[in-house]
Image (tube, helix red, strand yellow):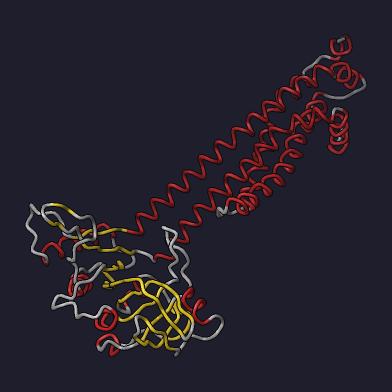
Amino acid sequence: MNTLAALRSAWRALTTNLMRSILTMLGIIIGVAAVITMIAVGSGAQKRVEDQIKGLGSNIMLVLPGAQTAGGVRLGAQTGQTLTEEDALAIAKDVPEVQVAAPSLRTGAQVVVGNTNWSTTVFGTTPDYLEARDWPLESGRSFEATEVAGSGKVALIGQTVAQQLFGDADPIDQVIRVRKVPLTVVGVLARKGQNSMGQDQDDVVVLPISTYRNRIQGMSGGRLKRVGSISVKVREGQSMKVAEANIRELLRQRHRLQPSQDDDFSIRNLTEMLAAQEESSRVMTLLLAAVAGVSLIVGGIGIMNIMLVSVTERTREIGLRMAVGARGRDILSQFLIEAVTLSLVGGAIGVVLGALATWGVAEFAGWQVALSANSVLLAVGFSAAVGVFFGFYPARRAAALLPIQALRHE
């Protein structure tokens, strides 16, 4: 019996008991749909973390002030004012692993253009901040050295601010007002998207730190020029842990902390935090796929069960085929093709249901999903393998029947 004839025979046998075949395929259908959906959801979560890492910048750390103590009571992290612009300069100069270190201050403020206004976050920082964050400009230019030194009335704006205040118009060289201070827009930042906390990174106005301190904050900051944070970018190929240790040692020396005293600052390795989250998402994707794969195995057991029943019901037919010249491998291939056909048809239906389920999760649950061809091929390939594995024993049992005994079977 050639392959085409075996396919026709298998198809006739399956369609003869159509409802039984559909119920047999149900496990495979559910399994394939579950595998595709779970991999899509897990891959979407992993891609979201990857996007957050790209949006954050590579090899970045954040140095924050420590806790303030009042009357013996610690008020919580970042309540102290322990970091200065000079600390940022020292980190960039004295820590060889560091590429740039950008001090920054921030506040919330209303930005006004004509009759339009928008509440946003205002950053005061240096041009090194854009390098630390791997944040290019979409248009315009960055701050010049004279503007940073002389409190120039210039600003960079994010995509969200540009859209809310100017719509489709070009913001470059337009004047915005922040707390009644007129500022000229000299650049528009490229889109960054949301960060790991779900905050819109493009909803921002960036000023020279001297402009922020002298014109927006309204004070010189004193001799020490306190800052709210320092963004540190580590050179490519350098160890983040070594850089963190060197920064901690340098700041302890600068702040004259004794060995018995705790740090009056904290260092957050943001890249490692997100990398750990990415690894967790990858492991979760594998676990979800493994759990969904159990459904395929259950479906395979169903195929084996129904194929054994089919062999028993068709014993006389098998004997008759053998009596007229069918060889054992012909019987084996026929039943094996039936099992694989059940798996592949169920897999095809499962692919459609999996794609629909993935679309439903993205549309109604609002989750980010990533449906890939690899996940579809994996699910269908695994379903075919299940058909071969669980169909081989019934097929082998059918091929091993003796013609005389098969013909006598009632």
Q: Give above or below for 366 relative to 293.
A: below
Q: Residue furthest front?
A: 115
Camera-nearest residue between 169 and 355: 169
Q: Quadrant of the C terminus?
A: top right
> Residue 146 sits in which quadrant?
bottom left
The location of residue 97, given as percent across then percent down, is 25, 67
Quarter occupied by residue 350: top right
Choose between 165 and 331: the one closer to the eye: 165
Indicate whether 101 appears above or below 364: below
| Residue 73 horizontal side relative to residue 57, left or right | left
Residue pictured at 18% horizontal, 66% vertical: 81
- The image quadrant of residue 251 is bottom left
* 275 horizontally vs 248: left or right: right
Residue at position x 25%, y 63% in the image: 63
Count every numbered label the image shows and give the total.
0
Q: Position of residue 360 (x, y in %)?
A: 65, 50
In the image: residue 51, left or right of residue 125? right
The quadrant of the image that shows the N terminus is top right
Percent position of residue 245, x then y: 20, 58
Q: Residue at x 13, y 78 (%)?
A: 223
Q: Residue 316 location in percent, x, y?
A: 88, 16
Residue at 71% from the left image edge and 40% from the top image edge: 347
Q: Is residue 238 above or below residue 375?
A: below
When the figure is inspected, residue 235 is found, relative to residue 291, above or below; the finding is below
